[in-house]
Amino acid sequence: MFGSMKSGANAYAKVGIETGVLAASPHKLIVMLFDGALSSVRMAQLHMQSGNIEAKGKAISRAISIIDDGLRSSLNKDAGGDLAQSLDSLYEYMSRRLLEANLKNQPEMLEEVYGLLQDIKGAWDAIEPGAAAQVKPNVSQQQAPKNAGYGDLGPRLSTFASA
């Protein structure tokens, strides 16, 4: 009569994600992409351990999509210089490792990518624009750390809210 509790919870979660994306700053959008990629890699590890091949493949595909179509495509290689180029190469490496982990069923490759994502996310968290203002109240918004080579993220991230 009213549908399942699970479908209601999923709909609520989807609305929450979409609302979060619409209200988020460019910095927060990158954080959300990292969170999604980390979650997908962790889910792939769990599915790999349980032998659920289909779910493992979907989780790995989602992680690759977030890395390639979200993090990597959002890099501004012109403005970001060497940092953006290095991140681009690292993201490409992570995507290849995820594909290889899927094909060879290698959990240690998933763990490697998970660790790399955590490291980059940790650095990204450290340059949060609000954090810079709290540490040095005299620093103007124009002097706050830039988005590490990421350009305007708005329209590209809407695809991840529905994933």
Image: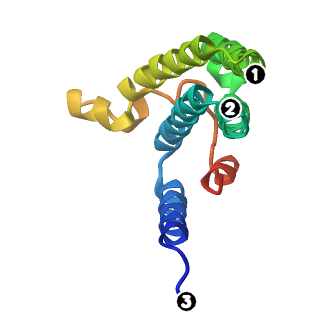
Q: Amino acid at mark 3?
A: Met
Q: Earlier in the sequence, mark 2 or mark 1?
A: 2
Report whether 129 appears left or right of 116: left
Say which quarter of the image contains residue 152.
top right
Say which quarter of the image contains residue 130.
top left
Question: Could you classify mark 3 by the number of other residues whose Cα lies within 10 Å: few (under 14), some (14-19), or many (20 or more)?
Answer: few
* Identity of the residue drawn at 43% across and 20% down: 123
Q: Nearer the viewer, residue 65 or 43?
A: 43
Residue 1: which disc?
A: 3
Say which quarter of the image contains residue 112.
top right
Mark 3 and mark 2 residues within 8 Å of each other at the beta carbon: no
Q: Position of residue 56 (x, y in %)?
A: 67, 34
Q: Position of residue 3 (x, y in %)?
A: 55, 80
Q: Position of residue 38 (x, y in %)?
A: 52, 31
Can you say which quadrant of the picture contains the N terminus?
A: bottom right
Residue 112: which disc?
A: none
Q: Amino acid at mark 2?
A: Ile
Secondary structure state at the residue bearing disc 3:
loop
* Identity of the residue drawn at 69% across and 21% down: 98
Q: Earlier in the sequence, mark 3 or mark 2?
A: 3
Residue extending farthest front: 51
Report whether 33 appears left or right of 68: left
Residue ID for mark 2? 60
Q: Looking at the picture, does residue 104 appear above or below residue 14? A: above
Q: Amino acid at mark 1?
A: Leu
Secondary structure state at the residue bearing disc 2:
helix
Report whether 99 appears left or right of 107: right
Q: How far is mark 3 from mark 1, CA to CA? A: 42 Å
The answer to whether residue 69 is visible is yes
Residue ID for mark 1? 99
Front label number (3 vs 1): 3
Mark 2 and mark 1 residues within 8 Å of each other at the beta carbon: yes
